[in-house]
Image: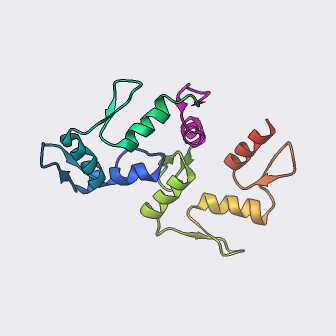
Amino acid sequence: CDKCPKSFTYRRGLIPHLRTHEGISYPCDKCSKTFTDKRNLKAHLLKHTGITYPCDKCSKSYSKKGALKTHVQEHHESTRFVCHECSQSFSREDRLQSHLLLHESTAFICATCSKSFLRKDGLKNHFLRVHKRIRFPCEKCSKIFATKEYLRIHRLSQHEGKGFKCPECTKSFPRPNKLKRHLLTHA
Protein backbone atom coordinates (compact mmCIF):
# COMPACT_ATOMS: atom_id res chain seq x y z
CA CYS A 1 0.00 0.00 0.00
CA ASP A 2 1.42 3.39 -0.90
CA LYS A 3 -0.48 5.08 1.95
CA CYS A 4 0.72 2.89 4.85
CA PRO A 5 3.34 0.19 5.56
CA LYS A 6 0.99 -2.75 4.87
CA SER A 7 1.92 -4.99 1.95
CA PHE A 8 -0.04 -7.63 0.08
CA THR A 9 1.00 -10.60 -2.03
CA TYR A 10 -2.01 -10.28 -4.32
CA ARG A 11 -3.87 -7.30 -5.73
CA ARG A 12 -7.17 -8.81 -4.53
CA GLY A 13 -5.99 -8.20 -0.96
CA LEU A 14 -4.77 -4.67 -1.65
CA ILE A 15 -7.94 -3.34 -3.32
CA PRO A 16 -10.26 -3.74 -0.28
CA HIS A 17 -7.51 -2.40 1.96
CA LEU A 18 -7.16 0.78 -0.14
CA ARG A 19 -10.82 1.52 0.59
CA THR A 20 -9.97 1.91 4.29
CA HIS A 21 -7.97 4.99 3.32
CA GLU A 22 -10.83 6.46 1.28
CA GLY A 23 -13.22 6.64 4.23
CA ILE A 24 -15.98 4.73 2.39
CA SER A 25 -17.88 2.41 4.70
CA TYR A 26 -20.90 0.12 4.56
CA PRO A 27 -22.66 -0.17 7.95
CA CYS A 28 -24.61 -3.22 9.05
CA ASP A 29 -28.19 -2.24 9.90
CA LYS A 30 -28.44 -5.09 12.44
CA CYS A 31 -25.38 -4.25 14.57
CA SER A 32 -22.67 -1.61 14.91
CA LYS A 33 -20.12 -3.16 12.53
CA THR A 34 -19.00 -1.31 9.40
CA PHE A 35 -17.20 -2.65 6.32
CA THR A 36 -15.10 -1.14 3.55
CA ASP A 37 -16.38 -3.62 0.97
CA LYS A 38 -20.00 -4.46 0.06
CA ARG A 39 -19.14 -8.16 -0.32
CA ASN A 40 -17.84 -8.29 3.25
CA LEU A 41 -21.04 -6.64 4.48
CA LYS A 42 -23.14 -9.22 2.58
CA ALA A 43 -21.12 -12.08 4.08
CA HIS A 44 -21.54 -10.52 7.54
CA LEU A 45 -25.32 -10.13 7.09
CA LEU A 46 -25.59 -13.91 6.65
CA LYS A 47 -24.42 -14.26 10.27
CA HIS A 48 -27.59 -12.47 11.38
CA THR A 49 -29.79 -15.02 9.56
CA GLY A 50 -28.52 -17.84 11.78
CA ILE A 51 -27.66 -20.03 8.78
CA THR A 52 -24.19 -21.52 9.19
CA TYR A 53 -22.09 -24.22 7.60
CA PRO A 54 -20.23 -26.12 10.35
CA CYS A 55 -17.00 -27.99 9.68
CA ASP A 56 -17.43 -31.67 10.56
CA LYS A 57 -13.71 -32.01 11.34
CA CYS A 58 -13.36 -29.18 13.89
CA SER A 59 -15.47 -26.65 15.80
CA LYS A 60 -15.39 -23.85 13.20
CA SER A 61 -18.47 -22.78 11.26
CA TYR A 62 -18.94 -20.41 8.35
CA SER A 63 -21.75 -18.26 6.99
CA LYS A 64 -20.81 -19.14 3.38
CA LYS A 65 -20.53 -22.59 1.84
CA GLY A 66 -17.48 -21.50 -0.19
CA ALA A 67 -15.66 -20.35 2.94
CA LEU A 68 -16.24 -23.76 4.56
CA LYS A 69 -14.92 -25.50 1.43
CA THR A 70 -11.77 -23.34 1.45
CA HIS A 71 -11.28 -24.04 5.17
CA VAL A 72 -11.55 -27.82 4.65
CA GLN A 73 -9.11 -27.71 1.72
CA GLU A 74 -6.58 -25.60 3.60
CA HIS A 75 -6.75 -27.26 7.01
CA HIS A 76 -8.04 -30.81 6.67
CA GLU A 77 -7.21 -32.26 3.25
CA SER A 78 -4.28 -34.67 3.05
CA THR A 79 -2.41 -33.06 0.12
CA ARG A 80 -0.16 -30.49 1.74
CA PHE A 81 2.54 -28.24 0.32
CA VAL A 82 4.98 -27.38 3.09
CA CYS A 83 7.36 -24.42 3.15
CA HIS A 84 10.92 -25.67 3.74
CA GLU A 85 11.80 -22.34 5.42
CA CYS A 86 9.13 -22.08 8.13
CA SER A 87 7.05 -25.32 7.89
CA GLN A 88 3.82 -23.45 7.11
CA SER A 89 1.61 -25.69 4.96
CA PHE A 90 -0.69 -24.91 2.06
CA SER A 91 -3.40 -26.83 0.24
CA ARG A 92 -2.29 -25.60 -3.18
CA GLU A 93 1.15 -25.37 -4.76
CA ASP A 94 0.55 -21.88 -6.18
CA ARG A 95 -0.15 -20.59 -2.66
CA LEU A 96 3.11 -22.11 -1.44
CA GLN A 97 4.97 -20.48 -4.35
CA SER A 98 3.51 -17.06 -3.46
CA HIS A 99 4.42 -17.63 0.19
CA LEU A 100 8.02 -18.54 -0.73
CA LEU A 101 8.47 -15.03 -2.13
CA LEU A 102 8.23 -13.76 1.46
CA HIS A 103 11.45 -15.61 2.30
CA GLU A 104 13.45 -14.30 -0.66
CA SER A 105 16.07 -11.81 0.40
CA THR A 106 16.01 -10.09 -2.98
CA ALA A 107 13.16 -7.64 -2.56
CA PHE A 108 12.29 -5.29 -5.39
CA ILE A 109 13.40 -1.79 -4.35
CA CYS A 110 12.03 1.41 -5.86
CA ALA A 111 15.07 3.28 -7.18
CA THR A 112 13.27 6.60 -6.76
CA CYS A 113 12.06 6.39 -3.13
CA SER A 114 13.64 3.13 -1.80
CA LYS A 115 10.32 1.52 -0.86
CA SER A 116 10.60 -2.29 -1.11
CA PHE A 117 8.19 -4.79 -2.64
CA LEU A 118 7.99 -8.58 -2.57
CA ARG A 119 7.06 -8.82 -6.23
CA LYS A 120 8.17 -7.06 -9.39
CA ASP A 121 4.60 -6.21 -10.37
CA GLY A 122 4.09 -4.55 -6.97
CA LEU A 123 7.07 -2.29 -7.63
CA LYS A 124 5.84 -1.55 -11.16
CA ASN A 125 2.34 -0.64 -9.93
CA HIS A 126 3.81 1.55 -7.18
CA PHE A 127 6.02 3.35 -9.64
CA LEU A 128 3.21 4.01 -12.10
CA ARG A 129 0.98 5.37 -9.32
CA VAL A 130 3.56 7.40 -7.42
CA HIS A 131 6.39 8.34 -9.79
CA LYS A 132 4.86 7.96 -13.26
CA ARG A 133 5.92 11.41 -14.50
CA ILE A 134 9.61 10.42 -14.43
CA ARG A 135 10.84 8.53 -17.55
CA PHE A 136 14.29 7.46 -18.78
CA PRO A 137 14.41 6.69 -22.54
CA CYS A 138 17.14 4.59 -24.17
CA GLU A 139 18.74 6.65 -26.92
CA LYS A 140 19.63 3.52 -28.95
CA CYS A 141 16.28 1.72 -29.16
CA SER A 142 13.76 4.22 -27.72
CA LYS A 143 12.58 1.89 -24.93
CA ILE A 144 11.48 3.87 -21.88
CA PHE A 145 12.46 2.95 -18.32
CA ALA A 146 11.11 3.92 -14.94
CA THR A 147 14.53 4.50 -13.34
CA LYS A 148 18.09 5.35 -14.32
CA GLU A 149 19.15 2.01 -12.87
CA TYR A 150 16.80 0.07 -15.15
CA LEU A 151 18.09 2.08 -18.13
CA ARG A 152 21.70 1.34 -17.10
CA ILE A 153 20.99 -2.39 -16.79
CA HIS A 154 19.20 -2.34 -20.15
CA ARG A 155 22.14 -0.62 -21.87
CA LEU A 156 24.63 -3.06 -20.39
CA SER A 157 22.67 -6.19 -21.23
CA GLN A 158 21.10 -5.21 -24.56
CA HIS A 159 23.56 -2.82 -26.20
CA GLU A 160 26.93 -3.52 -24.59
CA GLY A 161 26.67 -7.30 -24.14
CA LYS A 162 27.47 -7.10 -20.44
CA GLY A 163 24.54 -8.95 -18.92
CA PHE A 164 24.77 -11.23 -15.91
CA LYS A 165 26.19 -14.46 -17.34
CA CYS A 166 25.40 -17.88 -15.93
CA PRO A 167 28.61 -19.69 -14.90
CA GLU A 168 26.95 -23.06 -15.64
CA CYS A 169 25.72 -22.45 -19.20
CA THR A 170 25.75 -19.84 -21.98
CA LYS A 171 22.66 -17.92 -20.89
CA SER A 172 22.85 -14.24 -19.94
CA PHE A 173 20.36 -12.16 -17.94
CA PRO A 174 19.68 -8.41 -17.69
CA ARG A 175 19.32 -8.41 -13.88
CA PRO A 176 21.10 -10.26 -11.07
CA ASN A 177 17.85 -11.55 -9.56
CA LYS A 178 16.92 -13.16 -12.92
CA LEU A 179 20.31 -14.91 -12.96
CA LYS A 180 19.83 -15.99 -9.34
CA ARG A 181 16.45 -17.52 -10.20
CA HIS A 182 17.94 -19.24 -13.25
CA LEU A 183 20.79 -20.72 -11.19
CA LEU A 184 18.21 -22.69 -9.22
CA THR A 185 17.54 -24.72 -12.38
CA HIS A 186 21.12 -26.02 -12.21
CA ALA A 187 20.87 -27.06 -8.54
Residue 141: percent from the left, percent from the top?
A: 71, 74
Location of residue 133 with respect to 172 vertically, above or below: below
Is 181 in front, or is 130? 181
Residue 12: percent from the left, percent from the top?
A: 42, 52
Is 134 in front, or is 57? 57
Location of residue 65 with respect to 59 vertically, above or below: below
Q: Residue at x 72, y 64 (%)?
A: 155
Q: Is residue 102 magenta?
A: yes
Q: Is residue 41 left or right of residue 70?
A: left
Q: Is residue 142 left or right of residue 39?
A: right
| Boundaries of the magenta span | 80-106
Q: Residue at x 12, y 42 (%)?
A: 31
Q: Is residue 118 magenta?
A: no
Is 103 in front, or is 89? 89
Q: Is residue 1 visible?
A: no
Q: Is residue 72 visible?
A: yes
Residue 180: percent from the left, percent from the top?
A: 71, 43
Is 154 in front, or is 68? 68
